[in-house]
Image (tube, coloured by chain):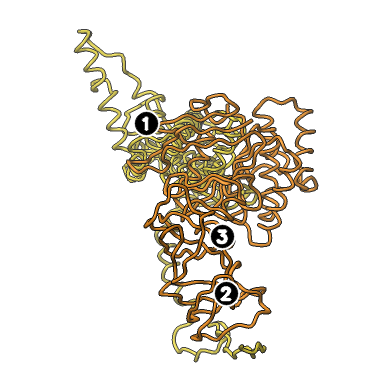
Amino acid sequence: MTALAPHPAPRVPAPRRPSEGQAPPRRGLPAWVWAVPPVLALAAVVIYPLGAVVAESFTGPDGAATTAHYAEVLATERFRDALTTTVLVAVCATVGCLVLGLGLALVIAFVPFPGSRAAGRLVDTYLSFPSFLITLALLFLYGTVGVANGLWTGLTGADTGPFDFMSTPWGVILAEITFFTPFVLRPLLAAFSRLDTAQLEIASSLGARGGRIVRSVILPEAFPALVAGGALVLVLSLNEFAIVLFTGAKDVVTLPMLVYTAAILEADYTTACVVATVNAALSVCLYLLYRTATARLRGSGSGPQKGGRRAGA
Amino acid sequence: MGIRLDGVSVSYGGTTVLDSLDLTVQPGEFTALLGPSGSGKTTALRAVAGFVRPDSGRVFLGGSDVTDLPPHRRGIGMVVQSYALFPHMRVDQNVAFGLRARGVPRREVRTRVGEALELTGMAEYARRRPRELSGGQQQRVAISRALAVRPRVLLLDEPLSALDARLRTEMTTELARLHRDMPDLTVLHVTHDQGEALTLADRVALLDRARLREYDTPRNLYDRPRTAFAAGFVGSANLLPARLDRGNVRFCGLDVDASDTLPSGTSDGDDLRVCLRPHRLTLGPSEHTVRGRVTDLNWRGSTHRVTADVDGHSLTAEVPGTAEIPDLGTTVEIGFTRRDLVVVPAGEEP
């Protein structure tokens, strides 16, 4: 029999960390020097142009700092209308995206149908499309001379078709919902893929029907993803320009459209800078709100759970 | 309420995962579905729960055909390996979930949640979140949640597999106590751990490759297995090739009268398997003795496992740790009595 005796622990040298200063000192430039080029590039490309816009909005005709431009622009009906339209379109588009995105995500993730995986992949592809392409496609379908109206006039012999909403706020909202829904869908599918399917089965075995399972089990788990997706869509739709321009909705003047009109069509750079600064401030505020909300949700989140995960999403 | 599966078959994409399963669990009985991975035991349980729709056959709960009923209308409680607690709910909210889903009045919900948590000793953790509990505690909450709805049938899908060995032993005792306290509760317990099955179950359904191999009491499965698969899977066993010759079983150069353990329908010349449990073998001569060369020695704390090559077959004896152990390569005598021997037909082995 082998005698059991305590063996002395082998002497293994502790791994050395680079920060312990054991490595031979390297000769060369100090670390901060390497930060200078990217900071300079950032300043030239991002900070300076933004700063110039903000500075212009606060500069009077005599070159002195003033808030007079703000008092003047913010008091105009044109600005107030644009702000109202921007917020209304953004909120409606966000709500539409949340409803549609949630419904689609639930079907793709939890209703087994052939091609559900392909549908998930399609969402990823869709995210790479330019926004004007979606608007163009909708115009092709529902525009005044689009396919839908063509079919209608062909069938009924009428002079015009019933679809005439693409140049109204509803057309813009439809286009934004169509384009931005994948931005809600993607984080939701990711959240659903992390959900333990056993939770759904247990809920069902305990007597819960589909609606209660969605409400009590799935939605609370997916809530952070829903908030993140919704906030992202809200910020993006606040700043959306191409969709509004491509629908040709002359009466739908949003803040970005107002900037475009003032700067390019009217050569009123000061007004353009004031509106752009307000638009940017609005976006930054929303972004900060979104960050705070997601940080809080993450803090009270459930953390990873053991068990089966949905593979399809 | 009893459970009856009547010729239940399930297949996925042309692969049969459960083949014509006939199984009857009496009301109040604790039945274990035991088998290796892929044997179909979880599929059988999921068919009872309603998560799997059989291709053919019917499922009955308490005499009613529930094959076409959705899970939420079957009146079952279920506990799974991953606990599947709802992470955003507190412990008491988790336990109350089923009661609320069934429309139990608010006041009664509170009482029954308290009772269910008391049952598993988790009452003091009622306000905690699942992530603040250990694995064992989470599993107790999962059991409370399943029992709170007063199910007619409790389905356990490898509920102890995620726990460490010490907790598993503790929870096995706990489950046995719960079943003693609720003798009317019918339990179907899926496990691949034979220790769990033998400890807890009134009867064990042994499945392999989608088919039911044996269904008997744990004692009979262990002491009197009817198939080579059962002999080899339930407990450790030496399975030695044998042949029936003029009423005697011939194996390893021995000629043993085992007429009382012969499988029915056996006739002269049939291939058989002799099952000898390692702990029933002794080192040294006995009523029947074989000789072999020691090929392996394993110390297991309270016992030694001595493996010897006997006539080209490996034979393992498990002897007390205090016994004198031969050296590797030496010749050893291994003895057993006629009562230690079980004869089964030659067939699939685990």
Looking at the image, is A176 positioned above or below residue A286?
above
- Res. A97 image quadrant: top left
Going 69% across and 56% down the picture, which residue do you hit?
B134
Q: Secondary structure at mark 2?
A: strand
Residue A281 visible at all: no
Q: CA distance from mark 3 to mark 2?
A: 14 Å
What x and y, as percent, mark residue B262? 49, 53
Letter of the chain that mark 1 sits on in the rendering: A
Going 61% across and 50% down the picture, which residue do you hit?
B218
Letter of the chain that mark 2 sits on in the rendering: B
Q: Which residue is mark 2?
A: B305
Going 55% across and 38% down the picture, which residue do you hit?
A200
* Crowd band around label 2 with a 10 angstrom C-alpha radius: few (<14), some (14–19), many (20+): some
Q: Which tint was used for chain A? A: yellow
Residue B25 visible at all: yes
Q: Which residue is mark 1?
A: A175
Going 36% across and 45% down the picture, which residue do you hit?
A124
Q: Secondary structure at mark 3?
A: loop
Q: Quadrant of the C terminus of chain A?
A: top left
> Do the residues at discs 1 and 3 belong to one chain?
no
Q: Which tint was used for chain B? A: orange
Q: Pointers 3 and 2 in contact (CB under 8 A)?
A: no
Q: CA distance from mark 1 to mark 2?
A: 75 Å
Q: Which mark is residue B235?
A: 3
- Disc 2 marks a residue whose amino acid type is Arg
Q: CA distance from mark 1 to mark 3?
A: 67 Å
Q: Nearer the viewer, residue A215 or B141?
A: B141
Letter of the chain that mark 3 sits on in the rendering: B
Point out the residue furthest to the top here.
A157
What x and y, as percent, mark residue A74? 53, 35
- Disc 3 marks a residue whose amino acid type is Gly
